[in-house]
Amino acid sequence: MMSELTLTVLRLGLLVGLWAFVFAVVGVLRGDLYGTRVNKRAAASPNRPSTPPQGIEGRRGKGAKPARPSKKGPTRLVVTAGPLSGTTLPLRPAGTLIGRSPECALVLDDDYASGRHARIFQDDRGTWLVEDLRSTNGTYLGATRLTEPREVAAGSVLRIGQTMLELQR
Amino acid sequence: MSVVSSVAPRSGRTTELVLTLDAVAIVGLAYVNLGLATTGSVPPGLAALGLGYLGVALAFHVVLRWRASYADPLILPIVTLLNGLGLVMIHRVDIAEGRDISDGVALRQLMWSTLAVAIAAAVLVVVRDHRLLRRYTFLAGAVGFALLLLPLVPGIGNQQFGARIWIRVGSFSFQPGEIAKLALAVFFAGYLVQTRDALSVAGRKVLGMTFPRARDLLPILIAWLASLGVLVFEKDLGSSLLFFGLFVAMLYVATERVSWIAIGLGLFGAGAYVAYLIFGHVQTRVLLWLHTFSPEALDTSDQLAKGLMGMAAGGMFGTGLGRGRPDLTYLAESDFIIPSFGEELGMIGLFAILVLYALLVERGLRTSLGTRDGFGKLLAAGLSFSLALQCFVVVGGVTRVIPLTGLTAPFLSSGGSSLLANWTLVAILLRISDHARRPLPDPAAGSAVAEARTEVVKLP
């Protein structure tokens, strides 16, 4: 007969193997708890090249961007007050949609926001504009309510319902 | 400062391959352990059986790479492990009963597994989009109800162990309720996605819950009567609970109304109580459940008591594969396979198995959350809930939480119909998860057709 020691090692090894498998599965699954990736980043990184070198333009999925974000304009949108306070998202030249609808780039959890509330985009000349999409409660740039697309720059403060947004470089 | 960006899902096929190999390795380890404990030598068929099982799992993996490359990467490894552990335990009971491997239940189960995997792969290849199933909503409903009631047909219906849930044609016996589970999930999903607005909007508020109008109660009453029919005429609490629970859960998922659960539980409780008062066989089940160790109960059946004693003998770490006596319990390889595992792998091993079931159900519900169409959401939620409910009924039955019923533990228990149905269920879940996780084509990139210039094909 086999020695009892071998059998005990095998028996406990099987239990360890089972649980190791369970933990491996849970490890893969962990990514599921966060549908989005949250990257910690230093407050300011001025040395970061804002345009990628030509060599990696043709990378998979990225494609060639016709209009690069200009150096002067704002590059990201920061929520400074409201339920999503602290959230940052990069501005896209094609336009960043803000509202309660899930199709928006910034989905607000705010009872005073409309489904498609406002849009921040870059026009042909490279200036950044904010446009109210006929929202119920309006979009405020500083203290004035928007009636037509208005130019914005880094440092502009927007208010949508109870949410304050700031454009940053 | 944090930056939120959405992550494109990875297909995870390599993860799946590695975990599937792990699963097969664990099954192999269990088989070697069993051989060493019972005969003192490594079983001679290890290479053939191990490579055979590995081949089956890898073949399914290749089909996934080919036809559902974004399907959930965790479902196949979990199912491979559960099915393999079931095979080892069935083989273990074979050894205890003195059956050789060539005429044992385990080899038959392995053949059924291979057939089930082949059918599941065929489902993945044929059903390219789960929304195709919606076309057959009412056909699936008719087939489901027919299968559920088929064992009542005289001539082919067959009563075994006090429940009439088998059909027998010649020497071939089958449990149609398992397939009915799939057909009914398709039917409920297709039906509820059409009618859920009517079922969820109108109603009056009592005790903080919105109750539906009386006329909207008709579908749930029909389902209730059908499930009571199964309970009374087929004498099977398990199928009845599974079928009615599936309907109520999908109704809840479709309408987000807690009142449906209250109504469903109330109706089932009342129906079961009345059945208890009227029918002798229900009273026997309840006696076995509540007073398992009383002399009257032990006279009727000591199966449940022996199963409990087996689990107690296993304790925390178990006796080790091949070192317990699971065969003392009647049906240790099918209905009582959970106590067999509890005895030989102990509570630690049994809980690993239960966690595997929980993870499998979680993947199904995650698929339901991720998919974009209402039918797919309801179908995935219903299928994974039916797995969860079946595990609850089986494990609850052998641990005296609820009365014992005749359901099988998915993927573990011996039984061809159960394996076929559950592998097909997994194939449908994988199909939906492929649909849910596949990244949308990037609208910014544009399609080749949209960017192509108009071309003059032919000048007159």
Image (cartoon, coloured by chain):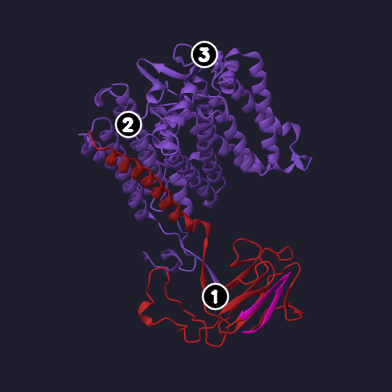
State which chain is coloured red.
Answer: A
Question: Which amino acid type corresponds to the residue marked 3 in the rendered image?
Answer: Thr
**Within-10-Å neighbours for mark 3: few <14, some 14–19, many 20+:** few
In terms of image quadrants, where is residue A154? bottom right
Cα gap from disc 3 to disc 1, whole angstroms: 74 Å
Would residue B53 be visible to someone looking at this image? no
Mark 3 and mark 1 in contact? Answer it, CB < 8 Å: no
**Please, what is the dominant secondary structure of the magenta stretch?**
strand
Q: Is residue A168 above or below residue B458?
A: below
Residue named by callout 2: B322
Same chain shared by disc 3 and disc 2: yes
Q: Quadrant of the N terminus of chain B?
A: bottom right
Magenta range is A153-167
Question: Which amino acid type corresponds to the residue marked 2 in the rendered image?
Answer: Gly
Q: Residue at x 26, y 39 (%)?
A: B50
**Within-10-Å neighbours for mark 2: few <14, some 14–19, many 20+:** many
Same chain shared by disc 3 and disc 1: no
Dot 3 falls on a residue whose secondary structure is: helix
Please say whether residue B44 is one of the residues in the magenta stretch.
no
In terms of image quadrants, where is residue B13? bottom left
State which chain is coloured purple.
Answer: B
Cα gap from disc 2 to disc 1, whole angstroms: 64 Å
Residue named by callout 1: A92
> Which numbered dot is residue A114?
none
